[in-house]
């Protein structure tokens, strides 16, 4: 999809369809819409779409009046979703050239970027492996039209393109089935991305991880015939900004059967998405390489398959993490925290002063927050506030969860320093508490994205499948770092 901005008057703007936001209570007199508004057919209700053919006063062949809700509640994230819904609607009608008429009062960087993001994210489809798609519908171009547009507007459109394409890169990775995206294949994808965007990279193999003492990670990997990999991707700014070094750690379980503590068969095919945290870190690095924040950022993605092979670890096994802590493995389906434990410790060893991890870690967070909010846990108030501010700016919904020391009592083991699960109650919290033991005193935020990384049904503005959360938040965190 070609992205552009234009300050051409709408009467001369050439497009197959022109998207025009309409708010509740507005009196839209243009395009021959007044009668439809008067009759109540057009209400401005959010995501209510009305297509007008042969509109009056514009060069476009069609005008899509896009309900934008109450004007006082309209913001950049609302525009992102509205644009995505409009794009998906028009694409279904085989419309190729689409423009969005953005009111000059909304002609700032946040709104322009959000509009472009919505268009690119909305046009994404998870159908790579479907055959017989010679007539597949697609959008060729998207233009943000603002009378009196500036260079800032063009720059914002480019930022929106970079963000959305990186988010779709992460979504593509998550969509890959486990027979096509093994840990080593994920490492290859990371290497290819890093080389394309001039990032440093390395991949640690089983022997290197064993030499480093990563017993928690390797314990998960030993049940699979597929070898594990620890992906490391580094961004170094040309000029430094203080001593901060941001580490992004993402869970990369390319398929999760649960191991010996095997999952139910129903819905297990979805477990290819258990590497969504790792994919989001790689997507964020793709963005960061192009947007060039002033702080160094390094991503660490431990990749394994969790399989019940003859060599798989068993409930009751005790492993020694890289930090030296011993862990009693009570449940082999609580594997994500084991691989993250070693990756977090390694990130600290590599000089990271601040850490964020993202993982499809617990079903418990879905019980607590549903599919709407990411569960956020932090050991440092300032770091928590940084991430929440970045999430709010990008429209990623996150909810601060408790992480009080008393929760550690749930993880007591008579046989090892810590158990990998804490029983039925507070499962998302005890999982985060486990990770806190390996983050130590380093300012750290854990994002449990189990409920938000995958969309079970098509939405008006985005397809079923991976969401790409929290790529935008991570990029905003890095680029706004002061």
Image: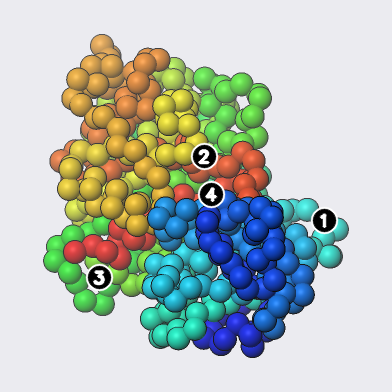
Q: CA distance from mark 3 to mark 4?
A: 28 Å
Q: CA distance from mark 1 to mark 3?
A: 44 Å
- Residue identified by numbered label 4: 467
Q: CA distance from mark 1 to mark 2?
A: 26 Å
Decide which of 468, 248 is in the foreground and name it.
468
Q: Residue 348: x and y, percent? A: 23, 49
Residue at point 47% right, 53% down? 70
Within 10 Å of the Cα at label 2, are there few (<14), some (14-19), or many (20+) other Cα atoms?
A: many
Within 10 Å of the Cα at label 3, are there few (<14), some (14-19), or many (20+) other Cα atoms?
A: some
Label ID, residue 289:
none
- The residue most toward the top is 414
Q: In this image, 355 relative to 220: left or right? A: left
Q: Is residue 190 visible?
A: no
Query: In the picture shown, does residue 220 fall above or below 443?
Result: above
Q: Is residue 307 visible?
A: yes
Labels 1 and 2: the sequence-earlier one:
1
C-beta proximity under 8 Å, tags 3 and 2: no
Labels 3 and 4: the sequence-earlier one:
3
- Residue identified by numbered label 1: 131
Asked which secondary structure carries label 4, the reply is loop
Q: In this image, 362 relative to 172: left or right? A: left
Decide which of 176, 216 is in the foreground and name it.
176
- Residue identified by numbered label 3: 294
Asked which secondary structure carries label 2, the reply is helix
Asked which secondary structure carries label 1, the reply is loop
Label ID, residue 274:
2
Q: Residue 379: x and y, percent? A: 20, 38
C-beta proximity under 8 Å, tags 3 and 4: no
Labels 4 and 1: the sequence-earlier one:
1
Q: CA distance from mark 4 to mark 2?
A: 13 Å
Q: CA distance from mark 3 to mark 2?
A: 31 Å
């Amino acid at each position: 999809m070609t992205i552009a901005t234009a300050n051409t008057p709408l009467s001369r703007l050439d497009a197959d369809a022109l998207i025009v936001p309409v708010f509740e209570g507005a009196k839209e007199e243009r395009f021959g819409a007044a009668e439809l508004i008067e009759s109540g057919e057009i209400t401005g209700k959010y995501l209510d779409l009305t297509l007008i053919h042969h509109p009056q006063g514009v060069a476009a062949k069609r005008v899509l009046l896009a309900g934008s809700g109450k004007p006082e509640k309209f913001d950049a994230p609302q525009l992102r979703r509205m644009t995505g819904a409009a794009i998906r609607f028009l694409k279904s009608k085989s419309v190729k050239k689409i423009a969005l008429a953005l009111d000059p009062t909304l002609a700032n960087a946040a709104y322009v970027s959000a509009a472009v993001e919505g268009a690119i994210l909305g046009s994404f489809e998870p159908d790579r492996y479907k055959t017989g798609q010679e007539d597949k519908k697609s959008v060729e171009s998207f233009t943000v039209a603002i009378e009196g547009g500036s260079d800032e507007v063009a720059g914002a459109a480019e930022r929106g393109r970079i963000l959305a394409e990186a988010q779709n890169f992460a979504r593509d990775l998550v969509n890959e089935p486990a027979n096509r995206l093994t840990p080593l294949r994920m490492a290859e994808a990371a290497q290819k991305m890093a080389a394309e965007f001039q990032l440093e990279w390395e991949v640690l193999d089983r022997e290197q991880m064993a030499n480093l003492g990563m017993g928690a990670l390797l314990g998960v990997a030993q049940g699979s015939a597929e070898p594990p990999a620890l992906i490391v991707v580094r961004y170094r700014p040309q000029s430094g900004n203080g001593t901060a070094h941001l580490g992004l750690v993402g869970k990369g379980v390319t398929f999760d059967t649960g191991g010996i503590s095997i999952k139910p068969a129903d819905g297990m095919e979805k477990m290819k998405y258990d590497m969504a945290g790792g994919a989001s870190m790689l997507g964020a690095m793709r963005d960061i390489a192009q947007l060039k924040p002033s702080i160094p950022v390094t991503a660490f993605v431990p990749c394994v398959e969790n399989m019940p092979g003859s060599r798989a670890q068993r409930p009751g096994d005790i492993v020694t993490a890289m930090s030296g802590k011993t862990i009693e493995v009570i449940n082999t389906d609580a594997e994500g925290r084991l691989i993250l434990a070693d990756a977090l410790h390694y990130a600290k060893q590599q000089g990271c002063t601040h850490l964020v991890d993202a993982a499809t870690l617990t079903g418990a967070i879905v019980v607590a927050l549903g599919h709407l909010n990411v569960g956020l846990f932090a050991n440092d108030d300032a770091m928590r506030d940084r991430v929440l501010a970045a999430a709010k700016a990008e429209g990623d919904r996150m909810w601060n969860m408790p992480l009080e020391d008393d929760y550690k009592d749930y993880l007591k083991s008579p046989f090892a320093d810590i158990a990998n699960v804490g029983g039925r109650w507070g499962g998302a919290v005890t999982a985060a508490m486990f990770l806190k033991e390996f983050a130590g005193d380093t300012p750290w935020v854990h994002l449990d994205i189990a409920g938000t990384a995958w969309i079970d049904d098509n939405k008006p503005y985005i397809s079923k499948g991976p969401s790409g959360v929290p790529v935008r938040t991570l990029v905003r965190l890095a680029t706004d770092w002061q």
